[in-house]
Amino acid sequence: MVNISFDKICRWPGFDCPKITGRQASLINNRKQKINKRQQRKIVKFMKVNKNHFRGLLGITLLAGSISSCNMMEDNLEGTEIHKATGLSTSPNILYQETFEGSDPLSFTHQQLSEDHSFQIANNPVFQGSYSGRFELNDDDDMVSNGTRAEVLFPEQSENERWYSYSLYLPADGFKVDSNNDIITQWHQGSGSGSPTTTFRIKNDRFFLKSGPTKEERVDYDVAEVKKDAWNEFVFHIIHSSGSDGLVEVWMNGEKVLNIKGGNINKNYDLPRWKIGIYKDDWNGSETTDSDQRIMYFDNVRMGDENASFEEMSSMGEEIDVVDPTPEPEEGNELPTEGSVQSLTLINTSSDEPVGDFLNQATIGAKDHRLSIVPNFEAGSEPVEVKFDLSGAANRSSIDDVAPFALSGDNGDGNFWYGEGLYPGDYELLVTPYYNVNGQKVAGPEQLFRFTIVQADENEILDITNTITEPEEPALPSFDIKSLSLINTSSDKIVGEFTSGTTITAKDHRLSIIPNYEGETPVEVQFDLSGQDVRNNLSDSAPFSLNGDDGNGNYWYGEGLYPGDYELKITPYFEVDGERVPGQTEVFVFTIEEGNSTVIG
């Protein structure tokens, strides 16, 4: 291998290198940090600094050999031809949609791409249509925006509730396992805000979501094992908030895998912007990891507004409707009806020996933090996978898919890991087993264990205490909808009250609806209208109207109510123990017919 410095080349006869600006110097410094990783591509990278000076070098056999040795994949890339996005979908609730089928893909985004290979159009693999978007990042790529990345940034948003979705393909040859983070989706609050408050990542071939309003409050939520050489669809519904009304919901291949309530942005900065692609900060500068290349494909990328729904964001169509999340078990595949965890075993990970068994409300003495926990299942009720959700003195989630199912993992040969450890404090551990029922992985009854760890001279169970308890559902306030009032929004007067099954005659569409209820006033009411028209609205102040109001008796009709059959679902939300909790949904059906006046019945 020949090593040739840029300074030496600039001293070769016939090479009069131009003066370097501050930006070019910065780029060269980035290159110098990367250069030792891939010496074989050194001359090619120098050519990017001054292509005219190096054009004559293309005939050199050494350089030709270097270029020909670049790693290539059979992606059937479309060369220089670019295909335009389909644009908006048929739903007005979809703000942006990219199918990679047209001539200007991702033109509405800000692109952070440093190399020619960073983003290209491919016709294999595709999820739907004829093309997909291919992102590639190599560990010796030039940094862009102060990081090693190949990403696109969506426009700024004015509302805090948004839906996001895409289909993702990870090739086994181009996305090998890495013990360091790959960030593939970011919700970033912009310059000065630090690291993104919510990210979707891959580590050790597992998908996980990291979210929290501040760095100290961010929690890792395990999602699933990475499936390579296959398309996987992800749908995200996020209420971006620093308060208790914050929400992150995630679906993978039609199955809801995460439901996280609470703050997810920093209140001191703007609403976040969405990014997709690849960011690997462990490759910044001269750093390296287990891998040196990341390739991924996106298709059917969508952003929806606050009125969007899962059905509008998903590309799976009717396929998800045929999947029964809790199939009827066949004989021999019974799903336990009660919690099957008999006790928990405390593990000293320094010696890999059990300290002892304990139950709910136990007190544990610990000489240090190198501890883990293993659940003991009833004979015949062993699951195929266990999810652990730890909260209290520490917050984290993990999934173990091989017995003995340890909180912080193990190697399967009796060597237990302690991960972040267990320090003194009060804890809650939610244990959710998953079972194989008719070939599908189904969650069994979850069980909650509370325990306290105190500093001690030795590791020991100080108080085994009482029996295991199931998670308690919060007591909801009384709330009962007695009737609905029809509002004429032209006059802001009540036309009359009605109940389910009523026929209404209306002279025009300028109408709205408010519920008449008994009991405690909720903090919010969700309206889900379907039938002749489909839309959703969340009202956060009384009198809680279908199409909104200004709180002073001025009602809006929005898109109106035209003749036809309707179904209206009304869900109240209450503040319970600092959390936003839904009450019971009530359903009303009604019909609107055209007439000369607006009357009920």
Image: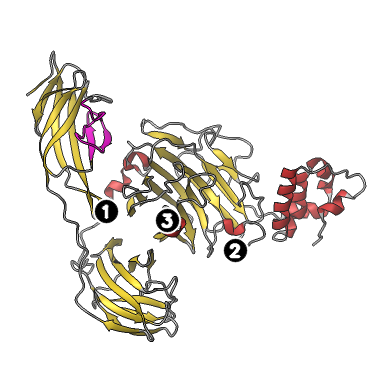
In the image, residue 494 lies at what x, y percent?
13, 24
Query: In this figure, which residue is indicated by the disc labeled 3?
Result: 209
Quarter of the view holding residue 467: bottom left
- The range drawn in magenta is 525-553
Instruction: Sort mark 3 into few (<14), some (14-19) or many (20+) by Cα contacts within 10 Å.
Output: many
Residues 414 and 551: in front is 551
Circle nearer the viewer, 3 or 1: 1
Residue 233 in view of the camera: yes
Residue visible at 57% across and 40% down? 111
**Direction from residue 436 to residue 418 in the image, left or right:** right
Disc ID at residue 289: 2
Residue 123 in view of the camera: no
Query: In this figure, which residue is indicated by the disc labeled 1?
Result: 578
| Quarter of the N terminus within the rendering | bottom right
Q: Secondary structure at mark 1?
A: loop
In the image, residue 484 lies at what x, y percent?
12, 32
Say which amino acid is labelled 3.
Answer: Leu
Between the C-alphas of marks 1 and 2, the distance is 42 Å
In the image, is residue 125 above or below residue 352? above
Say which amino acid is labelled 2.
Answer: Thr
Q: Are marks 1 and 2 in contact (CB under 8 Å)?
A: no
Say which amino acid is labelled 1.
Answer: Gly
Residues 587 and 74: in front is 587
Q: Earlier in the sequence, mark 1 or mark 2?
A: 2
Residue visible at 41% across and 54% down? 212
**Direction from residue 47 to residue 593 in the image, left or right:** left
Q: Secondary structure at mark 3?
A: strand
Total tally of numbered discs in the picture: 3
